[in-house]
Image (spheres, helix red, strand yellow):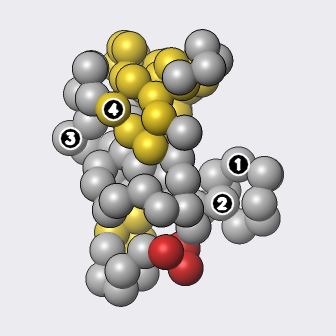
Amino acid sequence: MNAEVRTIEYDPNRNARIALVQYEDGEKRYILQPTGLQVGDTIIASTSAPNAIGNALPLAAMPLGVQIHNIEVHPKKGGQLVRSAGGVAQL
């Protein structure tokens, strides 16, 4: 599902910036802002999404060596690993 980045905001409760995204169905959600993501960018959450900044896809669909953050250990539970500002993991 496609989403457009509406705003990038400071959150005093974390050390990473957050981005407000609006999905094509009108739903709005906050995500952790990856470095390089800007207002107006389009991101995709899909199993067939291209490997680009901000896109969300399963680990099995990512190429080896890619840097990732906000890793979800169990489906539908939300990101649990590598969530702090500047943190990355390499697949």
Residue 49 numbered tag: none
Cα separation between marks 3 and 1: 22 Å
Give the percent coordinates (x, y) of residue 74.
78, 65
Query: On the rendered structure, is 56 left or right of 6?
Result: right
Residue 88 seen from this side = no
* Residues under numbered marks 4 and 2 in contact, where contact means CB atoms less than 8 Å apart: no
Q: Residue at x 49, y 75 (%)?
A: 61
Which badge, 4 or 1, comes first in the chain's sequence?
Answer: 4
Binning the other alpha carbons within 10 Å of mark 4 as few (below 14), some (14 to 19) or many (20 upward) gives some
Q: Amino acid at mark 1?
A: Gly
Q: Quickly name the residue at label 3.
A: 36
In the rendered image, which quarter contains the N terminus?
Answer: top right
Badge 4 is on which residue? 42
Residues at discs 2 and 3 in contact (Cβ within 8 Å) = no
Q: Secondary structure at mark 2?
A: loop
Between disc 4 and disc 1, the foreground one is: 4
How far apart marks 4 and 2 lie (CA) works out to 21 Å
Q: Looking at numbered disc 2 in the image, what kind of residue is underneath it?
A: Glu
Asked if labels 2 and 1 touch by Cβ distance under 8 angstroms, the answer is: yes
- Residue 88 in picture, x, y percent from top left: 37, 64
Which residue is painted at 40% across and 64% down in the image?
A: 68
Q: How many marks?
A: 4
Q: Amino acid at mark 3?
A: Gly
* Residue at disc 4, secondary structure: strand
Which comes sooner in the sequence, label 2 or label 3? 3
